Image (cartoon, rainbow, N blue to C red):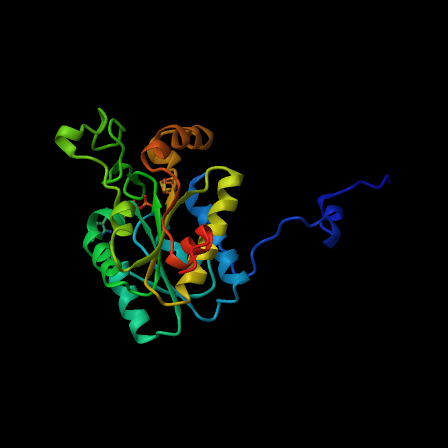
Amino acid sequence: MAETTGIKDYIKPENLVYKKTGIMTDNILHYCPGCGHSTMHRIIAEIIDEEGLQSEAIGVSPVGCSVFLYHYIDIDWQEAAHGRAPALATAIKRLCPDKFVFTYQGDGDLAAIGTSETIHSCNRGENFLIVFINNGIYGMTGGQMAPTTLPGMKSTTSPYGRDTRQMGFPLKITDIVATLPGTYYVTRQSVHTPANVRKTKRALRKAVQYQKLNKGTCFVEIVSNCPSGWRMTPVEANKWLEENMLPYYPLGDLKTPSEETSQKTNNPE
Ligand SMILES: Cc1ncc(C[n+]2csc(CCOP(=O)(O)OP(=O)(O)O)c2C)c(N)n1
Ligand code: SF4
């Protein structure tokens, strides 16, 4: 019988260019195809792994599409009620000051029901990291309008598009927390292209390293997509994100620690 080349022949150590991150579990991600949550899970897992934080990390998972985040990354977790993650993270970090504590929250969770917890924990300068996934909509519950929904953007509760006279303007909560004295590093990134994935990974690593200094809250917003809630294919959603979300939520650092600013400007202080 003629020899055939099967997939097994290619799975050799020398052919391996990409593999599962060590601390990601074998559970199958439940996300819709193309959803930014899965990319972000991978990036967070890689950084925790690479920074050697697996045994000291405690994550607080939200209510929203990423409610099962605790199934996917093999670290300690607490599950918070919708919007309450920063309150729970405050307690955890104060009780266990040596741990690396972070929350992971959607925009409905963080910028609607949890606005108060977000603002006050950032204003108190609690020593944890907040990862904020802004997809402009309530994904899990079927695509209702969120505080972050863009003007004119359609959702199940704004079927003709968000009318700002009736429904107010999108809440740029990341810009607000950047003005608070308790925040140490605030940045806005995205994961809709490979280049942006790399930039996000750099920014998140920085946030994790800054967080270890315990000098205040670090806040990383990810402008993300929701192909299902937006009623688009993943490719259309990423294009729409670039053309519509990014002009409203521009990417980049909103607040950097003064050490970094002075290094950049060669300021002797
Ligand atoms: C106290 C409470 N209020 C409301 C809900 C219903 N609820 C579940 S998920 C969700 C919104 C999720 O949207 P978001 O936080 O933006 O996350 P996404 O699903 O888009 O990732 C809401 C309102 C709930 N579970 N608990
Ligand atoms: S509904 Fe939206 S946010 Fe939720 S998993 Fe699907 S694409 Fe992602």
The residue depicted at 86 percent of the width and 39 percent of the height is 2
Nearest the viewer among 139 and 84 is 84
**Vertical placement of residue 197 versus 237, above or below:** below
How many numbered marks does the figure carry?
A: 0
Can you name the residue that lies furthest to the right here? Answer: 1
The residue depicted at 39 percent of the width and 34 percent of the height is 227
**Vertical placement of residue 42 versus 167, above or below:** below
Q: Is residue 139 visible?
A: yes
> Residue 92 placed where, x, y %?
31, 70
The residue depicted at 33 percent of the width and 35 percent of the height is 229
Nearest the viewer among 85 and 7 is 85
The reply, left or right, for residue 97 in relation to residue 177 is: right
The reply, left or right, for residue 122 in relation to residue 193 is: left
> Residue 109 placed where, x, y %?
26, 50
> Residue 27 placed where, x, y %?
49, 55
Quarter of the image with the C terminus in it: bottom left
Q: Is residue 41 visible?
A: no
Can you name the residue that lies furthest to the top here? Answer: 160
> Residue 196 placed where, x, y %?
48, 41
**Vertical placement of residue 229 versus 70, above or below:** above
Nearest the viewer among 124 and 201 is 124
The reply, left or right, for residue 15 in relation to residue 187 is: right
Can you name the residue that lies furthest to the left here? Answer: 166
Quarter of the image with the N terminus in it: top right
